Image (tube, helix red, strand yellow):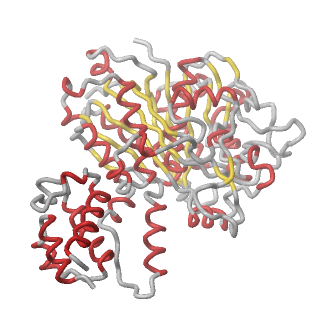
């Protein structure tokens, strides 16, 4: 899957789950600081990414994914 | 220590016959049934195909999309009812001490639909890898509606649920009333909420033979005190009241609907689900409430009965009323508004408290609908005034609301027209 495809899918999930505008979902945007996610939302986002990309995100890795860009990079490298 | 007086100053509800108190009350007086075919799930293999569902309810009218999937319907109903209640009360949150205002909104079963959905998905998955949503637990807890409402209005006083199945929200009101009486709180948002029209609930209550199976005549199936009654009709929704220290209410110039003057709670201590055959627990709860109110039984004008339309439950309640009230049992008016709303389980006590308050305010007894003149139970004394089929004007100064729950748990509340 190309970075562009991953990016599109990731952004769609974030827009859906966090109820934000697509324009807010920039690479630099932090889930908690910029997009209004609470701790439960972040867990849910990670679970959605796992489901959509057929991959498992280990917990220690999940903790380091805090921005849109970090999610896109991890999933580009690990998507099945 | 002298007890404080406690008054009702705000009302809100979401019900199968209207999503505001005004609409609900109008439909009650018109004798409208809330029953219809179940739309919430595929009921084709169930024995019961109908219930009293909340209608014309669109979550996005009240909540942002992002919020909706985190809220079980039972919590949504509570938040909507609490919003109406708070607006109705005219309470200015910036001018009161919110450390002294709490919330007790009960649910008998909690987020059952959310529970069934996620547990169902888990057992249906081949892998059985637990993939529960992080919202799963906060969606299903019985106390969580109280938590939500405290956050919605910044209320930092006592906060929990009072759980006693179908008496839950009557106990919630009684407990909060006590807190205000002793000065632990100045005001409390109280009530109940339920959204248990689910496969597990309809199946579970059905197999206990608690539910009416009168699928052909579903609109008239909830027929309390009639001969052919065969069980209750499941309802859903929420009722919320703001109750308040009288002085607090006067100081802020609140409109006062009624005063709460008595609360009685008791246990049948007999059987988990069957009522005591002589209504012993119901007698004790009614008597306790009347004694606490410091009135005579003959002062009561109207009883909003538990009246679920089960063969045994109705009979035992009538026996209990006759025992407590003696001759006056023939003078007072009784009605079962569950014949219209269905049985809102943990929310029924709060909804029926609202109805009792409205009855006092308007001097009208809402009816017990669905009774046919020839549909009599030989064990019921029809000289009593069951207010069949038509609302009745009557001066109502004092009303009693009865709630009896599985577990043999009973709670009764006495409301009185407010006078200085």
Using the image, determine if residue B321 lies above or below residue A67. Answer: above
Using the image, determine if residue B106 lies above or below residue B198. Answer: above
Side of B181 where B208 appears, left or right: right
Q: Is residue B7 visible?
A: no
Side of B327 where B13 appears, left or right: left
Identify the residue at image location x=70%, y=48%: B309
Using the image, determine if residue A14 lies above or below residue B335. Answer: below
Side of B383 where B79 appears, left or right: left
Residue B122, quarter of picture:
bottom left
Q: Residue furthest top?
A: B420
Quadrant where the C terminus of chain B sits is top left
Q: Nearer the viewer, residue A47 or B164?
A: A47
Rendering coords of residue B66 (x, y %):
32, 52
Identify the residue at image location x=45%, y=17%: B418
Identify the residue at image location x=68%, y=48%: B36
Rendering coords of residue B340 (x, y %):
66, 39
Rendering coords of residue B78 (x, y %):
41, 44
Q: Residue furthest bottom?
A: B127
Identify the residue at image location x=68%, y=17%: B393
Quadrant where the N terminus of chain B sits is top left
Rendering coords of residue B384 (x, y %):
76, 31
Q: Is residue B250 visible?
A: yes
């Amino acid at each position: 899957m190309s970075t562009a495809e991953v990016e599109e899918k990731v952004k769609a999930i974030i827009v859906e789950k966090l109820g934000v505008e697509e324009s807010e979902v920039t690479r630099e945007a932090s889930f908690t600081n910029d997009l209004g996610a609470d701790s439960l939302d972040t867990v849910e986002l990670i679970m959605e990414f796992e489901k959509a990309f057929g991959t498992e995100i280990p917990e220690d890795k999940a903790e380091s994914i805090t921005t849109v860009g970090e999610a896109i990079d991890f999933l580009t490298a690990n998507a099945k | 220590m002298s007890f404080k007086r406690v008054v009702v100053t705000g009302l809100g509800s979401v019900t199968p016959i209207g999503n505001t108190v005004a609409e609900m009350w109008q439909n009650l007086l018109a004798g409208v049934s809330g029953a219809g075919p179940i739309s919430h799930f595929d009921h084709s293999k169930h024995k019961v195909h109908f219930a009293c569902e909340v209608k014309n309810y669109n979550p996005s009218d009240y909540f942002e999309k992002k919020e909706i999937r985190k809220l079980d319907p039972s919590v949504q109903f509570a938040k909507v009812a609490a919003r109406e209640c708070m607006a109705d009360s005219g309470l200015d949150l910036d001018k009161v001490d919110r450390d002294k205002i709490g919330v007790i909104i009960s649910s008998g079963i909690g987020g059952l639909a959310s529970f069934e959905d996620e547990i169902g998905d888990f057992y249906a998955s081949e892998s059985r890898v637990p993939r529960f949503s992080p919202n799963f637990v906060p969606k299903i807890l019985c106390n969580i509606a109280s938590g939500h409402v405290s956050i919605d209005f910044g209320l930092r006083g006592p906060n929990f649920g009072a759980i006693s199945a179908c008496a839950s929200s009557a106990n919630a009101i009684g407990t909060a009333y006590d807190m205000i009486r002793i000065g632990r709180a100045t005001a409390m948002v109280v009530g109940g909420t339920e959204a248990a029209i689910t496969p597990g609930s309809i199946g579970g209550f059905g197999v206990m033979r608690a539910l009416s199976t009168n699928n052909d005549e579903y609109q008239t199936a909830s027929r309390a005190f009639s001969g052919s009654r065969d069980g209750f009709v499941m309802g859903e929704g929420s009722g919320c009241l703001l109750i308040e220290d009288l002085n607090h209410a006067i100081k802020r110039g609140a409109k006062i609907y009624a005063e709460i003057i008595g609360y009685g709670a008791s246990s049948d201590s007999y059987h988990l689900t069957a009522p005591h055959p002589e209504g012993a627990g119901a007698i004790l709860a009614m008597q306790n409430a009347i004694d606490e109110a410091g009135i005579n039984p003959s002062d009561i004008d109207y009883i909003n009965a538990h009246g679920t339309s089960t063969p045994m439950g109705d009979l035992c309640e009538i026996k209990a009323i006759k025992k407590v009230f003696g001759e006056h049992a023939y003078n007072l008016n009784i009605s079962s508004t569950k014949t219209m709303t269905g049985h809102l389980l943990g929310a029924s006590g709060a909804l029926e408290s609202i109805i009792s308050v409205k009855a006092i305010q308007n001097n009208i007894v809402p009816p017990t609908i669905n009774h046919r003149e020839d549909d009599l139970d030989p064990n019921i004394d029809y000289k009593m005034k069951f207010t069949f089929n038509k609302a009745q004007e009557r001066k109502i100064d004092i009303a009693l609301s009865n709630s009896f729950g599985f577990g043999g748990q009973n709670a009764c509340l006495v409301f009185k027209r407010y006078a200085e």
